[in-house]
Amino acid sequence: MVQKARISLLSPRVSRPEGSLSASLRCRCRPAAWLQRALAVAESFYVAKASQKTGAGMRLLRAAEKKARELGAPGLLVSTPFGGRLFVVLPRLNYAETNRIFSGVFANG
């Protein structure tokens, strides 16, 4: 059975006076008729500069993958800015580039 869920994962707060968030990953898992299964999509993936290279992002990604598997998704779609850090990291983790997204800008917005 295809399940629908939101997956929100947060890394522990960094022990700094401002208590800023070190990393977060929000995904959506919903039925995809063309797949006849759930489709998991990362909507927001953030790792603070101070938390990069600490493994925080990797732990979040692995936790999201695990939850997506539990919900019956065949994989996890992750969008990243072209040439950004995640753009370089994901292929090393056996993620394949499957699509390119184009953004249009409206004159009034």
Image: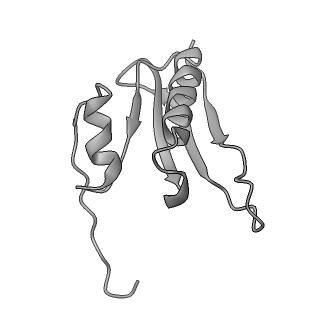
Q: Quadrant of residue 74?
A: top left
Q: Name the residue: 48% across, 35% down.
A: 58
Q: Name the residue: 22% across, 42% down.
A: 99
Q: Is residue 80 visible?
A: no
Q: Which x, y percent locates residue 35?
A: 37, 21
The quadrant in which the N terminus is found is: top right
Foreground of the two, 56 or 91: 56
Foreground of the two, 47 or 36: 47
Q: Residue furthest bottom?
A: 108
Q: Quadrant of residue 25?
A: top right
Q: Name the residue: 47% across, 41% down.
A: 42
Q: Which x, y percent locates residue 4?
A: 61, 29
Q: Is residue 32 visible?
A: yes
Q: Which x, y percent locates residue 82?
A: 24, 55
Residue 103 lies, with reference to residue 26, above or below; the image says below
Q: Name the residue: 58% across, 27% down.
A: 63
Foreground of the two, 97 or 73: 97
Residue 26 lies, with reference to residue 14, above or below; the image says above
Residue 69 lies, with reference to residue 45, above or below; the image says above
The quadrant in which the C terminus is found is: bottom left
Is residue 2 found left or right of 109 in the rendered image? right
